[in-house]
């Protein structure tokens, strides 16, 4: 029997990036995702010995799922630039091995593979001699498993491999592979922001599917379902139908499987060898002949065991790994936080969902009235047609996505004031995301103990900051009444209070230390407000003349400078002319001259070395500075200026977390660290420990990292995260 291997390039690439440490070549090029992808590809070829092979990739364009549901994958943390920068290299490897690539705008790699499986299965009906093996890094394609179609995927570690056939899927999920779509339709999928039916988890969904079959059969048999579950299903019938559509892979992508073009043929050995040597993949070079000769290749050793003795100098620098702050101590703290979780008031979220739903319904009617007809507000394509074709609005920035002009927030923001409907649409989107991502999604992620147990990660953000997934608690809104209401659903148990410890202006304090600017340091040393002082300096105001609006503008300027903003960028934010924005930046540097000198020195070093460093030694390679594209280089310069500041702030809070955890254990306090969001730590504190524990936490946070300006931590306390009052010492 002949074998066809279909590789989900997107999934394997992402899995490799997150599974392997930050491997770099001796020239400083990050290649961990490329190395992991290549290792998996070569191993799959050696293990499976296919006759035919193809690789599918995603494209950057939105898919039909985004058109159907604006919030699809909206909660996901943006993929780091280090990941995107490696994709061209991955495709170079595939092309060097003479393997065809399938990708099509508007479709995910999963959909392409589903289509190729369907066409391959049809071919098998005629020839009866084709086995299809899908090589992937996730489980989304498990729904495709059937006789003659298997999944080959990494196990718990990237170096392990697991096969899934029909029996393996049934044993793991208690369902047939095709029924996994029904499971997502009912239970949802937080990783893709597929809502499902609120209140029904995987266990309940599995029982319903086992008893009745698919979503359609379940809704036909509502009368046979217990009242509590029936009401949940009735309330979210539309969500169930939409969720099934989002979870179903598209088997009709307009592509064609030509097995003759997928033959695992010979390749240009010289070109492949040159590429592998350039990437310093010396341990993989001996495995290249295996493609042609079909000889068994030994199991790939974990990339963690790569040694410089193999001649791969610079591919893995253990010191750099430690400098990322991924120490065993920090990992232990994060696992403890995950295990403890944070208590959530489900009813508050349910009430908030209804409240937002009412406002959304009102907004919908008003928007339809303004436009003159109904349309799908969550469809970017339909919205684009309404705004640009019917209302003839012209945005200041026009970005075309596939077949329509962009309707993203940045584009629509340039139209505020041009038509009343714009502000209503922006409000609708904000509320819709708040409802779907938090008010509706969080209840489904509450465990049996009434708590949400997020997963903290140290290696996803490019800045070195921590991130969280499933759910992503880093993006919970901080501003606005509704944002506060979301936070107020995070509560303290009986006998406890929630304590928030938030660093005050930590990034600007780091900039003052790094630049050594005397005026900036004086402001922090004297305890003055940095934004008020900036308003006095750049807006020409006297201290008693500074208004709230002046301070808001000064805040934009302060953070803009720290992020390497250009006159054009500042002009856009402040809605002024670029010449006026340049004058503001010039006045800022006149008041704080050492900041300008530090920025210039940082950029010189970044261009020379190819990287910047935090005070703790965490390096960030800025490959954008090598680009021939001026726009890309300018973006690289902004990264180079901000990364040492933002990364050092991350170093500080991670060090504080370890210090606090150790001290709490030594003292025997029952206080638990439960959340880390941006510059804030949140604790669950027994009321009887509040005075002493808060004092301990503040002291450690303010003294854990030596700076030439004081670190200041502001404490707030309350029964929930949204309604807190300052804690006075």
Image (tube, grey):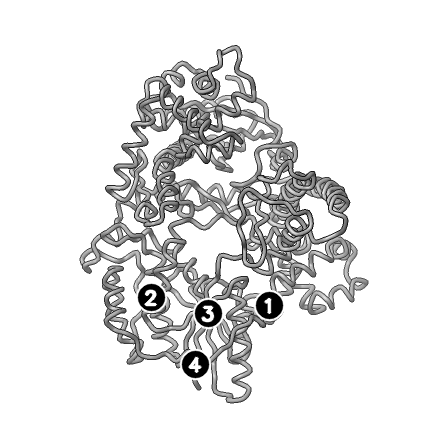
How far apart are the two marked residues, 4 and 1, measured between alpha carbons? 28 Å
User: Going from the N terminus, do you reach mark 4 or mark 1 first?
Assistant: 4
Check disc 1 and report its element: helix, strand or loop.
loop
Residue on which disc 3 sits: 102
Determine the CA span between mark 4 and mark 2.
Answer: 22 Å
For the residues labelled 4 and 1, say whether their Cβ atoms are less than 8 Å apart.
no
Classify 414 as above or below 582: below
Q: CA distance from mark 1 to mark 2?
A: 38 Å
Q: Which residue is mark 2?
A: 93
Q: Nearer the viewer, mark 4 or mark 2?
A: 2
Look at discs 3 and 1 and give the one toward the viewer.
3
Q: CA distance from mark 3 to mark 1?
A: 33 Å
Q: Nearer the viewer, residue 526 or 380?
A: 380
Where is the N terminus found, in terms of image quarters? bottom left
Q: Earlier in the sequence, mark 4 or mark 2?
A: 4
Question: Of callouts 4 and 3, which one flags the residue occurring earlier in the amino acid sequence?
Answer: 4
Q: Is residue 332 left or right of residue 198?
A: left
Q: Which residue is mark 1?
A: 174
Considering every residue shown, the one lying at the far right of the view is: 223
Query: Is residue 588 visible in this depiction of the protein?
Result: yes
> Residue at horizontal 49%, vertical 71%?
164
Q: Which badge, 3 or 1, comes first in the chain's sequence? A: 3
Q: In the image, 251: left or right of 640?
A: right
Q: Position of residue 461 (x, y in %)?
A: 42, 45
Task: Nearest to the eye among marks 4 and 3: give it.
Answer: 3
Measured along the vertical axis of the image, is residue 188 above or below residue 501?
below
Please, is residue 83 above or below residue 155 in the view? above
Q: Find residue 3 and name its label.
A: 4
Ranked by sequence position, the earlier of labels 1 and 2 is: 2
- Mark 3 element type: strand
Percent position of residue 79, x then y: 45, 50
Q: Where in the figure is residue 38, as x and y percent of width and height?
A: 34, 65
């Amino acid at each position: 029997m002949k074998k066809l291997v279909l590789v989900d390039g997107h999934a394997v690439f992402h899995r490799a990036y997150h599974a392997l440490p930050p491997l770099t070549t001796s020239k400083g090029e990050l290649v961990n995702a490329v190395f992991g992808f290549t290792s998996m590809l070569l191993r799959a070829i050696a293990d499976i010995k296919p006759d035919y092979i193809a690789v599918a990739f995603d494209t950057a364009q939105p898919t039909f799922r985004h058109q159907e549901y604006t919030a699809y994958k909206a909660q996901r943390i943006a993929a780091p630039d280090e990941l995107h920068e490696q994709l061209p290299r991955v495709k170079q490897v595939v092309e060097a091995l003479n393997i065809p690539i399938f990708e099509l705008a508007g479709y995910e790699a999963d959909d392409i593979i589903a289509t190729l499986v369907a066409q391959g299965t049809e071919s098998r009906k005629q020839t009866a001699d084709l086995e299809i093996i899908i090589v992937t890094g996730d489980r989304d394609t498990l729904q495709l498993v059937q006789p003659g179609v298997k999944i080959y995927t990494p196990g718990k570690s990237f170096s392990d491999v697991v096969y899934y056939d029909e029996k393996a899927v049934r044993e793991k999920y208690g369902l047939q592979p095709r029924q996994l779509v029904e499971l997502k339709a009912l239970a949802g999928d937080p990783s893709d922001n597929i809502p499902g039916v609120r209140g029904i988890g995987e266990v309940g969904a599995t029982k319903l599917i086992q008893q009745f079959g698919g979503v359609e059969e379940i809704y036909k048999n509502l009368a046979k379902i217990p009242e509590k579950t029936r009401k949940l299903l009735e309330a979210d019938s539309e969500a169930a139908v939409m969720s099934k559509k989002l979870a179903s892979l598209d088997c009709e992508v307009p592509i064609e499987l030509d097995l003759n073009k997928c033959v695992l043929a010979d390749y240009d050995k010289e070109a492949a060898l040159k590429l592998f040597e350039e990437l310093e993949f010396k341990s993989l070079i001996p495995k290249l002949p295996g493609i042609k000769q079909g000889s068994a290749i030994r199991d790939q050793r974990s990339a963690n065991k790569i040694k410089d003795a193999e001649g791969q100098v610079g591919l893995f620098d253990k010191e750099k790994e430690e400098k990322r702050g991924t120490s065993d101590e920090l990992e232990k703290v994060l696992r403890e936080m995950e295990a403890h979780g944070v208590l959530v008031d489900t009813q508050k979220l349910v009430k908030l969902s209804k409240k937002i739903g009412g406002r959304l319904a009102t907004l919908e009617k008003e928007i339809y009235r303004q436009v003159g007809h109904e349309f799908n507000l969550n469809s970017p394509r339909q919205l684009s047609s309404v705004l640009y074709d019917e209302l003839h609005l012209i945005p200041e920035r026009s970005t075309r996505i596939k077949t329509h002009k962009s309707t993203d927030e940045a584009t629509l923001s340039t139209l505020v004031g041009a038509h009343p409907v714009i502000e209503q649409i922006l409000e609708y989107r904000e509320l819709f995301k708040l409802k779907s991502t938090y008010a509706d999604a969080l209840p489904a992620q509450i465990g049996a103990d009434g708590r949400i147990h997020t997963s903290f990660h140290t290696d996803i953000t490019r800045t070195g900051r921590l991130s969280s997934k499933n759910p992503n608690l880093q993006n919970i809104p901080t501003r606005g009444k509704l944002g506060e209401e979301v936070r107020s659903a995070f509560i303290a148990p009986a006998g406890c209070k929630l304590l928030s410890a938030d660093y005050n202006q930590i990034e600007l304090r780091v900039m003052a230390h790094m630049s050594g600017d005397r005026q900036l340091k004086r402001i922090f040393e004297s305890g003055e407000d940095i934004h008020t002082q900036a308003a006095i300096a750049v807006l020409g105001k006297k201290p008693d003349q500074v208004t709230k609006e002046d301070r808001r503008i000064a805040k934009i300027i302060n953070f803009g400078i720290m992020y390497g903003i250009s006159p054009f960028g500042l002009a856009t934010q402040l809605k002024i002319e670029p010449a006026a924005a340049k004058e503001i930046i010039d006045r800022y540097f006149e008041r704080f001259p050492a900041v300008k000198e530090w920025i210039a020195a940082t950029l010189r070093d970044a261009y020379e070395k190819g990287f910047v460093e935090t005070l703790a030694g965490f390096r960030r390679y800025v490959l954008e500075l090598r680009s021939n594209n001026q726009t890309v280089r300018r973006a690289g310069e902004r990264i180079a200026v901000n990364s040492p500041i933002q990364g050092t702030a991350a170093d500080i809070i991670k060090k504080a977390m370890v210090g606090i955890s150790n001290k709490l254990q030594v003292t025997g306090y029952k206080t638990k660290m439960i959340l880390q969001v941006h510059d804030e730590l949140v604790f669950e504190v027994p009321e009887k420990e509040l005075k002493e524990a808060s004092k301990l936490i503040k002291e450690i946070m303010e003294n854990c990292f030596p700076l030439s300006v004081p670190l200041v931590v502001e404490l707030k306390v309350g029964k929930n995260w949204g309604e807190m009052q300052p804690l006075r010492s």
